[in-house]
Amino acid sequence: MKSTAWLTKTDGPLAAQFRFLIEADRLKTVIRANRIADDSRRENTAEHSWHLALFAMVLSEHALAPVDVWRVVQMLILHDLVEIEAGDAPLHDPQAAIGQAEREQAGADTLFGMLPPAQGAAFRAIWDEFESADSNDARFAKACDRLQPILLNHVVGGGTWTDYDVDEGRARARTSQIAHGSAVLWAAAETVFADAVAMGWLKPMPEVAA
């Protein structure tokens, strides 16, 4: 049985920060559709966020425009916290996407509202910036977020592409934001798509009728 009674002995902003951090631990329980690289299980969202932060640190030299890596990492650590409240909506599941934006906005209100006001507002601004993708930092963060599942899907031999019967056109359309953050990473993604089609893990684009 969990207990946070000890928090009554902690005053002010520190108590709020501790409550937020304990709540954030719930992200480890949110299971995503993607499998981890050894194909033994599906990843949880906390693992996903950590992996994306590492992507940003390793791949930042390939950003389309100069980025502040620390700000990108902050976005990637914070961007999916809202799934504690909203749950995960798999990229290739259109039904799961219905109402997800509203659920995530409500989740952001709840979670960032737990923090001391100034800190909560700062975190919410970072989250909003990622969502709107209106800065170089946010566009590169989005590129990392879209690239990671592509690589995992290929490593495990199809992953969510086969789960959701995805064709190359749909995969490209759902991940084209990568190009807005990095031409190099988008070129790499295109290579992965082509190989996945050749291997039979991703369906080819439907032929357009004459």
Image (cartoon, rainbow, N blue to C red):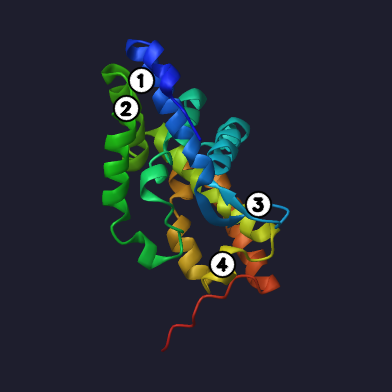
How far apart, in angstroms, are the residues tagged by discs 3 and 2? 31 Å
How far apart, in angstroms, are the residues tagged by discs 2 and 1? 6 Å
Residue sitting at x 36%, y 45%? 85
Residue underneath mark 2: 114
Between circles 1 and 4, the one closer to the viewer is 1
Between circles 3 and 4, the one closer to the viewer is 3
Residue sitting at x 61%, y 63%? 159
Residue 16: give x, y in percent of width and height: 35, 20
- The answer, for residue 187, to whether it is visible in the render is no
Which disc is residue 36 wearing? 3
User: Is 192 displayed left or right of 97 in the figure?
Assistant: right
Front residue of 161/68: it is: 161
- Say which label, 3 or 4, has the lower sequence index: 3
Q: What's the amino acid at mark 4?
A: Trp
Query: Quarter-wise, where is residue 89 in the image?
Result: bottom left
Helix, strand or loop under label 2: loop
Helix, strand or loop under label 1: helix
User: Marks 2 and 3: in contact by CB < 8 Å?
Assistant: no
